[in-house]
């Protein structure tokens, strides 16, 4: 699409700085990797989307109606944009010159509801439900496990995306099936993620020396 000003507008999947990471029937995941001083094309977001700043970054967003917003994010900051539930967003984003490295804004869009969804939120001490980050398409939990701690056996009645928030994460997972266990255990650095199709039963142990911190985005 070309606006009256001659500016090109593309879908988020076609924006060059938005690097595709995973696409399946349920989601589209990407990272917006914008070098300092560089700017994206105008692009449109249409789906409910969860975001996380993998590294600290500042960015300036200009909407198609010329609304300007400057955002300063610390590493691990999470936010939600319910584009499908409210209205699509068309904007372009400039990474500020003061950034020390390219932005790494992780985003995951909800495309379809899985067959198995939980009727109510997970009730477990290791999972903190974040109502402020939830929307009609998903629930968000912060998962935290101290070194040597285990979750004990518990059940997920849902499918979810897991996103690691910290480096040097070392988890051991049992009773979840081999691929399920490998998915958790691969999440060793900030920004690493996995899509888990449920339901599943498992227990998780922190075998590392640092607190394990992750985000669980549950499709509902």
Image (tube, rainbow, N blue to C red):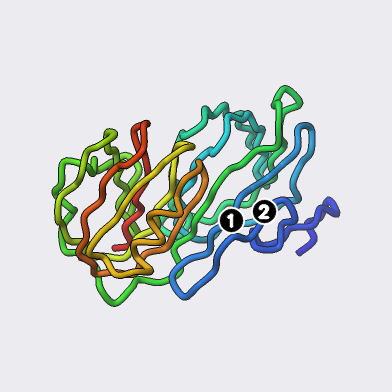
**Residue 102, how many percent across, how many down?**
70, 37
Distance Cα–Cα, label 1 vs label 2:
6 Å
Point out the image quarter for the N terminus: bottom right
Q: Is residue 168 above or below residue 17?
A: above
Q: Image point 54% across, 29% down: which residue?
A: 73
Q: Are marks 1 and 2 in contact (CB under 8 Å)?
A: yes
Left of 214 or right of it: where is 122?
Answer: left
Is 83 in front, or is 208?
208
Q: Residues within 10 Å of mark 2 (few under 14, many from 20)?
A: many
Q: In which quarter of the image is residue 12?
A: bottom right
Point out the image quarter for the C terminus: bottom left
Q: How many labels were placed on the picture?
A: 2
Q: Earlier in the sequence, mark 1 or mark 2?
A: 2
Q: Image point 72% across, 51% down: which residue?
A: 17
Left of 75 or right of it: where is 157?
Answer: left
Judging from the image, what secondary structure is the residue with disc 1 in?
Answer: strand
Q: Image point 72% across, 37% down: which residue?
A: 94
Is 89 in front, or is 126?
126
Outermost residue on the right side: it is 6
**Residue 163, how many percent across, how many down?**
43, 49
Q: Residues within 10 Å of mark 1 (few under 14, many from 20)?
A: many
Q: In this view, does 94 lie above or below 107?
A: above
Left of 186 or right of it: where is 72?
Answer: right
Judging from the image, what secondary structure is the residue with disc 2 in?
Answer: strand
Q: Is residue 53 above or below residue 159?
A: above
Residue that badge 2 annotates: 18
Q: Which mark is residue 30?
A: 1
**Residue 145, how many percent across, how many down?**
27, 38
């Amino acid at each position: 699409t070309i606006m009256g000003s001659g500016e090109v507008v593309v879908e988020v999947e076609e924006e060059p700085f938005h690097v595709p990471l995973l696409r399946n029937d349920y989601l589209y995941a990407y990272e917006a990797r914008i070098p300092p001083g560089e700017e994206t094309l105008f692009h449109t977001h249409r789906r409910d989307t969860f975001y996380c700043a993998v590294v600290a970054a500042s960015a300036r967003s200009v909407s198609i109606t010329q609304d300007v917003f400057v955002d300063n994010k610390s590493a691990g900051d999470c936010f939600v944009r319910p584009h499908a539930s409210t209205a699509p967003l068309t904007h372009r984003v400039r990474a500020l010159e003061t950034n020390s490295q390219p932005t790494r804004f992780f985003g995951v869009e909800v495309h379809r509801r899985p067959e198995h969804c939980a009727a109510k939120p997970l009730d477990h001490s290791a999972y903190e439900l974040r109502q402020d980050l939830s929307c009609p398409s998903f629930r968000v939990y912060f998962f935290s496990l101290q070194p040597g701690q285990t979750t004990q056996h518990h059940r997920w009645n849902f499918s979810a995306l897991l996103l690691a928030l910290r480096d040097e994460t070392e988890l051991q997972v049992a009773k979840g099936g081999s691929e399920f266990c490998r998915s958790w255990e691969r999440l060793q650095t900030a920004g690493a993620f996995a899509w888990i199709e449920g339901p599943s039963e498992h227990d998780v142990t922190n075998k590392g020396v640092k607190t394990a911190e992750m985000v669980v985005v549950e499709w509902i």
